[in-house]
Amino acid sequence: MLNILWFSAPHPCFLGPGQPCDCLPPLRAAAEQLRQKDLRISQLQADLRRPPPAPAQPPEPEALPTIYVVTPTYARLVQKAELVRLSQTLSLVPRLHWLLVEDAEGPTPLVSGLLAASGLLFTHLAVLTPKAQRLREGEPGWVRPRGVEQRNRALDWLRSGGGAVGGEKDPPPPGTRGVVYFADDDNTYSRELFEEMRWTRGVSVWPVGLVGGLRFEGPRVQDGRVVGFHTAWEPNRPFPVDMAGFAVALPLLLAKPSARFDAAAPRGHLESSLLSHLVDPKDLEPRAANCTRVLVWHTRTEKPKMKQEEQLQRQGRGSDPAVEV
Amino acid sequence: MLNILWFSAPHPCFLGPGQPCDCLPPLRAAAEQLRQKDLRISQLQADLRRPPPAPAQPPEPEALPTIYVVTPTYARLVQKAELVRLSQTLSLVPRLHWLLVEDAEGPTPLVSGLLAASGLLFTHLAVLTPKAQRLREGEPGWVRPRGVEQRNRALDWLRSGGGAVGGEKDPPPPGTRGVVYFADDDNTYSRELFEEMRWTRGVSVWPVGLVGGLRFEGPRVQDGRVVGFHTAWEPNRPFPVDMAGFAVALPLLLAKPSARFDAAAPRGHLESSLLSHLVDPKDLEPRAANCTRVLVWHTRTEKPKMKQEEQLQRQGRGSDPAVEV
């Protein structure tokens, strides 16, 4: 700028012979300008040395509602295998918080270690199922629903916090956007399922594969509304849906503090015991292409036979107990 | 620089009264300096506007040997669930190529669709098990090993290509670094397992959980060498290891073109029928912390009961066959 002005004005030294020369001010101004430009160059060089900002996360996870996945679990031979498999599936889902609730008096080393190694955001909870509710030797699995106390423990934590034995201890702050899903540790989940449930406003629903003696069970949808249910068993239950077939918006769960699972509910009515507090069946939100896509399967893992293990143990040659399986 | 020189030298205007003032050259020099600095500032600003270079890929996947995962699969109710679960696990592993081999005359829409949606690098193969080798109605599963023809089909493709019905059609070019692993679709795999096998030089081995009636089966290791095997069943087999318990370097497999699985091998000898061509038991490479960590589990998924489905189908109310499960 100034360098243009200098040469368009008459040079101050030529005001007249004998008069004191007046070119000191423009030289001082030029020196000051050079100082300013050196400063600017230093600043720009510093800006260039600064590491580039982290690239924007493709779906901007902070903007996504959190998916709270509630998983009850209990000690058994296939427990670690099932939890490894599930944790790896969950690791594919952005903005997810795993609430793993052990059916135990306190945290076990197997589960604590697995959670720590999972890389997931998690809260570790534990509550022992009361003896009266526990399955007795020889009773078929359907007599008493499993995981009721554990799911309710997770609901308590979401509502008021407290009691976590590992991981994130504080419940979601008021106003948190999120959705709560009850994911048992033996089912099979497509990663796509989680994006179907993420923007649930009240209660969302979808089909579940290989459940209830059918290829799939699920809502029947007409004109975008749930008008009934495809199920073979007690179709007149208030909500004939499997635990894996629905998700609930977190604000709705927090607004209805009495909504919880009832361990005394009749067989097949456990889901209804929660959902009846939360939603009218006609307001269920159908997902997964109007409930025409199966994205979760009610798989069951066989109990491994340990006959050879018992034989070897009697001979003192059992599998090394120090090796975690 | 120059601005310091100016004020340490006597000002040129004060050479004497009446003499022509000589401050034009320093002012011109200052102007030129300012022009140079403006140019430098423009350059730096342009540098800052330039997008940052793409961040370096953390493990530089191109430098890693490829893991070729060979999975035989056959149509059944839980097939899609199992393959979804496995494909999601494999999607966590860099530099992996899935060879999925259907026990079918040709590719099925279910498997083709699943592979296309998986995001994995894959080759889709298909070969029907000859009738004489197929399990007969009522025969227990262990009478005839499953997947033999399919695994051999994958070996053929790795060696000479041809016959792929989907995905990558060309076999690895000569000199490709890689490792081959036979991963059935029902086992459970920790993502860590794949990094254990990636740098296999010949044949690597590790324990497998929940197999052979034991908590785990696996090599016994002393001073970093395999000295025996923990197994309850026929410990004197040449290689008493499960299909999920070893991986073979690709160059070794290519160097031994006669190495394949023998469908006529006695029960429990299928793995040995391949490995006997490839390695001496004493040269097995123990992985997974000297075979003290279980990173794969021989889980088995229950066959779902379809009693209600059959009842509803008789009433014309069966599950919509258009919905893929």
Image (cartoon, coloured by chain):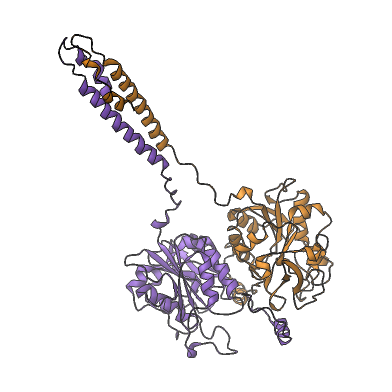
Chain colours: A purple, B orange
Residue B1: image location, x then y, percent: 34, 28
Residue at 56% across, 71% down: A83
Q: Nearer the viewer, residue B251 or B3?
A: B3
Residue B139: image location, x then y, percent: 77, 75
Residue A294 in view here: no
Q: Hey, which quadrant is residue A311 in on the image?
A: bottom right
Q: Nearer the viewer, residue A153 or B162?
A: A153
Residue A176: image location, x then y, percent: 35, 64
Q: Nearer the viewer, residue A36 or B123?
A: A36
Quarter of the image with the C terminus of chain A is bottom right
Residue A226: image location, x then y, percent: 44, 67
The tally of labels here is 0
Residue A13 in view here: yes
Quarter of the image with the N terminus of chain A is top left
Viewed as shown, does residue A43 lie left or right of B165? left
Above or below A52: residue B194 = below
Q: Hey, which quadrant is residue A249 in on the image?
A: bottom left
Residue at 68% across, 80% down: A305
